[in-house]
Image (cartoon, rainbow, N blue to C red):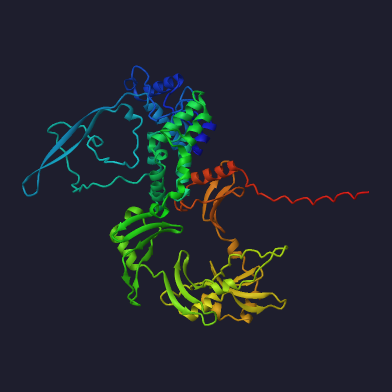
Amino acid sequence: MQIAQRLYENGYITYMRTDSSALSDEALTAARRQAAELYGPEYVPQSPRVYANKAANAQEAHEAIRPAGDSFRTPAQVANHLTGDAFRLYELIWKRTIASQMGDAKGSTATIRLGAVATDGRDAEFSASGTVITFPGFLAAYEEGKDESRGDDDSDEARRLPNVAKDDSLTASDIIAIGHETSPPPRYTEASLTAELEKRGIGRPSTYASTISTIQDRGYVRKQGSALVPSWIAFSVIRLLEQHFTDYVDYEFTADMEGDLDKIANGQAVGAAWLKHFYYGEDADPGLLSIVNNLGEIDAREINSVPIAEGITLRVGKFGPYLESSIPTVDPKTGEVVESARANVPEDLAPDELTAAKAVELMETAAPEERVLGADPHTGHTVVAKNGRYGAYVTEIIPEMTEEQLANQPVEYYKNGKPKPPKKPVKAKPRTGSLFKSMSVDSVTLDEAIQLMSLPRVLGADAEGNPITVQNGRFGPYLKKGTDSRSIGSEEEIFTITLEQALEIYSQPKQRGARAAVPPLAEFGPDPVSEKNIVVKEGRFGPYITDGVTNITVPRATSLEELTREQAIELLAEKRAKGPVKRTTTARKAPAKKAAAKK
């Protein structure tokens, strides 16, 4: 859309935010004249061709997108002024406009049978069915390319055959044995999903891009190449909507609502009355309010559960999908009977790839969720090793307060002497520590766990009295003195490094050059608005796009390998349109004025 916007602003095409298929008289005359000049008068029908809109609820305030002016410039005439995607888009618009005013292609379906003699002397016969084109018509100007079809695109009608006659002699250049097998419909791409939205009358051309962007940003789909792969959270959302908001997710509802909004815009209906009916409903239609009031009755666990195999259920949790087995198993190491077990589902495993056999495999190879290491001799608390979303770690289990401890809590009183109600006891935060890369849940010992939970380790202080600590972080082990951090060689050094060694490291100048010289992750050339270079950099919260003025985080659903220049330009444009982030500040309350002294 950004490219089309620039073509429109520079006078190459007409207004592009339209879904109309109607051309003005001026455009019809120009297209017919140019088709006759380029391909011959026999390619142009006697009267202009008029097309009905395929898109439901199409808005026809503008004519169809076409080359601008009353005399169209051919792609060859603009080749020196347009390059890349801009040229290809103009060429596409020009071809479709010219082809729309040309005659139909003519041909016939046929089956060609070829007779041959095999090397062993036996007769062989080959056949092919398809269409023989006798008059190309509009195909001379434009033959529509196809996105990956959601059906069988190898049909006889779609196959083009050469124009041959009976008893023609043909030379075989090669013989290839081709197998044929059926396959399920391919995944939607952005293009095929847009076509489906248009076909069902959902949305407008100006909203298709934002709709597809939204479902990616929310994690409902992810891009794998050009395909859109659904996530498990999308299945849960669909199940929730279909079971409890049935009328509102019906395909016809959105299309009908678009029509109602058009009527309101045209003055044929009253907006307030429509909203009242939509929210409060009537006798036959309960309305949205009654559904919202019953949200508490929804079984969230059932909505987020999908049976995969016998005794194995996939559940969509707060931190992603996981498998849960209800079949009791015996731990081979301890001999204990485990009533239920869990296994994480790999992020790159598509829902259709999670078969019953794959689920069993994941359950069998899953690392134990928790392993009891023993009791801390200093606190008596049980120490366990766990596998978490961000890796393996150790932690202590803080016991609940006993009734005696609760009863012996200090009592607080109001100013009038009455006792305050007892406060809810605040549970102490357990100590935790991430496992080193050389450790695992199965191998970590109690002593190692106690050491890990003791971090950060205080080494001492420098000459000015500033404390120096050593700890493990997201980017590896490091020393810290105030706000000055220094990396150290390995995780094992955390428990062996001395104060003298730390002071020696701090006596050296901090190496900032390497970090400052890190090249950008990607470059996309100048931005059409700011005219500054667009780059992708690694930030504190992940990769982000910037032109030096405007910054926007790369959507989680978009990988850097798939990010295009057009997407980067569009994301920056959307961020500029939103304007700067408004920071809210709490106004300081003015001091109360002293009352004037009475005289």
Relative depth, front residue between 415 and 566: 415
> Residue 45's quadrant in the figure?
top left
Please give left or right for residue 485 compared with residue 299 in the image.
Answer: right
Q: Nearer the viewer, residue 553 or 118?
A: 553
Q: Is residue 344 visible?
A: yes
Q: Position of residue 598 (x, y in %)?
A: 91, 49
Give 422 or 539, whichever is nearer the viewer: 422
Residue extending furthest left?
121
Q: Is residue 365 above or below residue 124?
A: below
Q: How many marks?
A: 0
With respect to residue 120, does 18 lie above or below?
above
Residue 393 in percent (x, y) is at 48, 71
Does any portion of residue 527 appear in the rendered image?
A: no
Q: Is residue 373 left or right of residue 40?
A: right
247 over 64 or under it: above or below: below
Name the residue at 80% across, 51% down.
592
Query: In the image as oriented, which residue stretches furthest toward the right?
Result: 599
In the image, 132 versus 158, the foreground residue is 158
Tell me where residue 409 appears, x and y as whole percent. 61, 71
List x then y, in percent, for residue 418.
Answer: 68, 64
Q: Is residue 514 above or below residue 503?
A: above
